[in-house]
Amino acid sequence: MELKTFLEQFNLSEDELSLMERIGSEHLFRQGEDISTFDKTASSFYFIKEGLIRSYRIIDGNDFTYTFYLPGDICVDYESILKKNPSQHYFEVLAPTIAIKYNYSQLEQLFEQHPRVERIARKMAESAYIRLLERVREFQSDTLEQRYLNLIKHHEDIFHAAPLQHIASYLGVKPQSLSRIRAKIVKR
């Protein structure tokens, strides 16, 4: 997804669109590259144009996938930025990725000068909040099979780039359990 297409949903003026395009810098990330700021306060975020990034944590030696970032998504440890605390998340590039990097402090200055641009940050926060609520709801009320089918329905691209163990972790199960669910679905 192109940045301009993403930004147009905020009804910004041509000047504001131009400012947003100018303060971002395009980066190309290789598959397997680690772009995390683990144990450091996050200060930037990425608009994903192409590719796939996952965020994860290591807890008691186990790798837990929190989310996948696809084209059109904003990849950020929003909690670290807002609380100004060290990040507890790692970010790994799962497929070659092109992203626009923004420094949050530069963006905050832009918010002061152009209040309509601040709408982008509000939408980011709203989107992150809704994504979190949906994830909690899924874990509270949906079966593993429903979560798996929902992921396929809404984000089939993940299955082409992410290893099975990361998908299983995201769904909250071991790879063996996910394999059984997949086999059960295929038999139908």
Image (spheres, grey):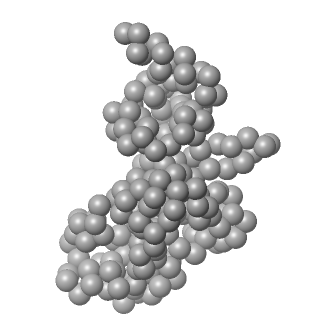
Q: Quadrant of residue 120?
A: bottom left
Q: Is residue 72 left or right of residue 66?
A: left
The answer to which of 64 and 156 lies nearer the viewer is 156
Q: Is residue 173 left or right of residue 94?
A: right
**Residue 177, can we see it?**
yes
Q: Provide residue 90's location: percent of width, then percent of height.
A: 64, 57
Q: Quadrant of residue 155?
A: top left
Judged from this view, the residue extending furthest toward the top is: 188
Judged from this view, the residue extending furthest toward the right is: 60
Image point (48%, 34%), residue name = 137
Vertical relation: 157 (above or below) 4: above
Vertical relation: 176 (above or below) 68: above
- Number of numbered discs: 0
Q: Provide residue 186's location: percent of width, then percent of height.
A: 40, 15
Image point (50%, 77%), residue name = 104
Q: Quadrant of the C terminus?
A: top left
Q: Provide residue 158's location: percent of width, then percent of height.
A: 43, 42
Q: Quadrant of the N terminus?
A: bottom left
Q: Is residue 50 left or right of residue 170?
A: left
Image point (52%, 52%), residue name = 94
Image point (73%, 65%), residue name = 39
Q: Provide residue 79's location: percent of width, then percent of height.
A: 59, 62
The answer to which of 1 and 112 lies nearer the viewer is 1
Vertical relation: 55 (above or below) 167: below
